[in-house]
Amino acid sequence: MDRPALIDRTDALSARPWRRLLERALGAARDVPTMLSTEEQKLYYWLAGFWAEGAGAIVDLGCFAGGSTARLAEGRRVAGLVPPIHAFDRFTADARTKEAILYRQGVAPFEGDDILPLAQAALAPWAPGIVFHRGEIDRMDWQGGAIEVLVMDASKTVESGDAMAATFFPHLVPGGSLVVQQDCLHWSQPWLPAQMERLGGCFRPVGHAPRDTVVFLCERVPGAQELEAARIAPFDDAALDASLAAAGAWLAPLGLAGRIEQTRASLAANPGKRRAFQFVKP
């Protein structure tokens, strides 16, 4: 496989080279249910297969039934990388989620809300290179050393976003780690772009995959004081909106300022809300 030269690794992200991949490149990962868009699926595969160099673990916060992890794992497989992929989730799905997502993607109906066996079976082709972590991610710790690629798709409340940043960001590699905020541009989670902008001295936005994913390069690992200052939970709506306005300017080089304006409109239409499920689309 041709991999980008080291000097071009970060610059390559802005050109979105994963778009040139054919879907068949994802191999067996295409069969694992996912909520990712087609381009997001290609991005995950490309990051593990073309960008990562094995300098640390790949961590997937929000594995669900294994879809995102499968795309990362297939990329890791073809690249011949050694570090494992750590898949975090509650691994549960209610009846509505099963009907709307899993059954529509070919999963046979099943009793109960436990989807860990489903995820383990779906990810069996890439075992034993996957480590499962079951529980509330914002209450879990990390003892796995350096993290090269950190995928975040579980910050559905402002408190969980703050907690996950405090737990995982200190283990990033300066100049060598990427943070993939899968819902960064989603109208129901305005704390995500605000938090990343508050940490703008440590991170640089380097890529975007529609619908909502933004990729950030860790240029410097944030310290404890910086992480505390970047906590969004104490913010009122005015302070959060001010950080969103700053995030719009910060993300403008990627052509994302308009998306942040949509997020600001959503915040204005949902005053005081700090949980994604509480938001009503304006």
Image: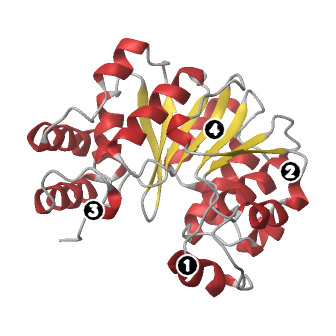
* Quadrant of the rendered image containing residue 92: bottom right
Q: How far is mark 4 from mark 3, CA to CA? A: 30 Å
In the image, what residue type sits under mark 2?
Arg
Q: How far is mark 3 from mark 2, CA to CA? A: 39 Å
Answer whether labels 2 and 4 touch (C-beta < 8 Å): no
Task: Give the residue number, with chain letter if any, for mark 1.
Answer: 95
Q: Residue at x 75, y 43 (%)?
A: 85
The earlier-in-sequence mark between 2 and 4 is 2
In the image, what residue type sits under mark 4?
Val
Q: Nearer the viewer, mark 1 or mark 3?
A: 1
The earlier-in-sequence mark between 1 and 2 is 2
Nearest the eye: 176 or 194: 194
Q: How far is mark 1 from mark 3, CA to CA? A: 19 Å
Q: Which mark is residue 77?
A: 2
In the rendered view, does 16 fall on the left or right side of 267? right
Q: Can you say whether 200 is above or below 220 in the image?
A: below
Q: Residue at x 73, y 28 (%)?
A: 56
Q: Which mark is residue 149?
A: 4
In the rendered view, does 1 fall on the left or right side of 21? right
Q: Which mark is residue 278?
A: 3
Q: How far is mark 1 from mark 2, CA to CA? A: 33 Å
Q: Can you say whether 250 is above or below 95 in the image?
A: above
Report helix, strand or loop for mark 4: strand
Identify the residue at the far front of this view.
112
The earlier-in-sequence mark between 1 and 3 is 1
- The spot of residue 252 in percent (x, y) is 28, 47
- The spot of residue 123 in percent (x, y) is 81, 60
Q: Residue at x 42, y 14 (%)?
A: 224
Q: Residue at x 44, y 47 (%)?
A: 155
